[in-house]
Amino acid sequence: MPGPDLHYRHALPVRIMHWLNVVALTILLMSGLQIFNAHPALYWGKSSYTGAGPLLQMTAVQKADGQSVGVTRVFGREFDTTGIFGMSKNREGEWSARGFPWWATIPDNQWLSMGRAWHFFFAWLLVINGAAYVLYGLGSRHLARDLAPDGRDWRSIGQSIADHLRFRHPTGEAAKRYNVLQKLAYLIVIFGLVPLIILMGLAMSPWMNSVWPGWIDLFGGRQAARAIHFIGAWLLVAFVAIHVFEVIVTGLWNNLRSMLTGRYRVPAGELHE
Amino acid sequence: MNSIDSRRRRNFLVRTLGATGALLLAGCNRLSQTEWFPKVLGVGEQASDAAAHLVTSRKSMAQEFTEADRSPQFRANGTANPNSAEYQALAARAFADWRLTVGGLVEKPASFSLAELRALPARTQITRHDCVEGWSAIAKWKGARLAPLLDAVQPKPQARFAVFYCADPMAEDGTDLYYESIDMEDARHPQTILAYEINDAALPIANGAPIRLRVERQLGYKHAKYVMRIDLVDSFAGIAGGNGGYWEDQGYQWFAGI
């Protein structure tokens, strides 16, 4: 039974779906980097050979002295990224030419077919989990009650930005609900970023292209879709980084417990500060 | 005292997280090596296959492009010049002696010279070739439509797949000939052709001379080059590794629509 200051914050279905997302997104990112490594370059347009160079490219380049270096080209600029992008040591400590290093990919060695198998399995898990979340969120009114910003939220947006920048966190009653920036971040990720990444994944499927020939050109073409899928994945990583940062600064243990058991200790007013 | 406590907790959690990450990676590698786990993962691909067929019709068309969309060069991937005496002999005489054999579960097995193939109903299409590695290239293809060719040999009712046997050896010692297979739905698709021209010129050796399969709703490895023989079968379980294609035998998916 929760004590007087323990607030029941996250319902069981939300907690289960949250941790399924953690597993699915981690594996999707790392198996996605495995797939990217099979051709570590991104382009804009309908094909990879439009006459324009790649937006991003990771390669191993042999220099005049015979030494190889890892090179990353971004919008035509070259960076020496030996050791991490283009050329890195494998698990056995041998240098090998590859986009992202072994510790960032599933499986760790170059194995495209296995990376695809992981990616598509967990893509389905993410889609099913996401659909279940939206249905649950509508049915339980979790979305309407906890995530949809109300008038008070919109009016407090300036204050909320200022509070975030000063690392001031809500206490008492205000800590029982999401703040407006939090709500907007979650809504943008749930209804904007993640659906876009999934759609761009589908845009890369030649079979799905035939549903309505030409639909992927609305996003710039198949290679553009691949680039958006990749950039979207890293925006999601940025979201997770900010999310985890906020979790830590607002009380790691308390937040973690609330996502495991549902119980959240409401920070008392001014007393602690 | 609270802050020391929480710092300790934080360090503990960071270390736990790091250890969990390392375990996860090692676990994923271990699972990839097992016999059973890739089969579990395969459920995802079966689901993609089913879903793709659910939202498209049998004859849904791959996107076709304009002349201006064509890639300046069409990348030759995989085999660029088959390392076999038989193929080199055919190439030396500009494929004048080459014949495509069509057999298996058909009423009227037949063979076709390149000139005979060129006389069959043809289709020209500007399509995008998507390699499983991630790159795409757009080219104009002309070839004999497979559906009328099948009508000519009269498939038996039990024929379920068309298997394409190719001239290019995938092993250094000249063995392990490339092969691929598609189902009858794809074989009869209007855009499925045996291409003998690319960008208005005869198909060069690097791109699969004298003919390569185009099966436009699937990834590049389904588009077998250097095709020598087509067999209609009711199952590919007994052929080579039993998975319906050279890359499929290496773990790639038979349904390459995604």
Image (spheres, coloured by chain):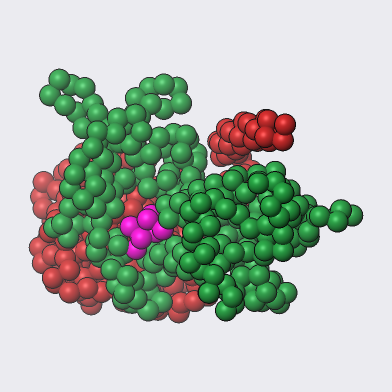
- Residue B141, image x and y in percent? 20, 67
Could you tell me which residue is drawn at 59 percent across and 75 percent down? A152
Span of residues in magenta: A225-232
Could you tell me which residue is drawn at 10 percent across and 50 percent down? B93
Residue B194 lies in the magenta stretch: no
In the figure, residue B193 lies in which quadrant?
bottom left
Give the chain letter for red: B
> Which residue occupies the foreground of this view, A130 or A182?
A182
Q: How many marks do you count on the picture?
A: 0
Judged left or right of residue A265, residue A64 is left
Could you tell me which residue is drawn at 45 percent across and 51 percent down? A238
Give the chain letter for green: A
Could you tell me which residue is drawn at 26 percent across and 49 percent down? A56
| B179, above or below A90, in the image | below
> Which residue occupies the foreground of this view, A65 or A4?
A4
- Indicate the quadrant containing the N terminus of chain A: top left, top right, bottom left or bottom right: bottom right
Judged left or right of residue A145, residue A39 is left
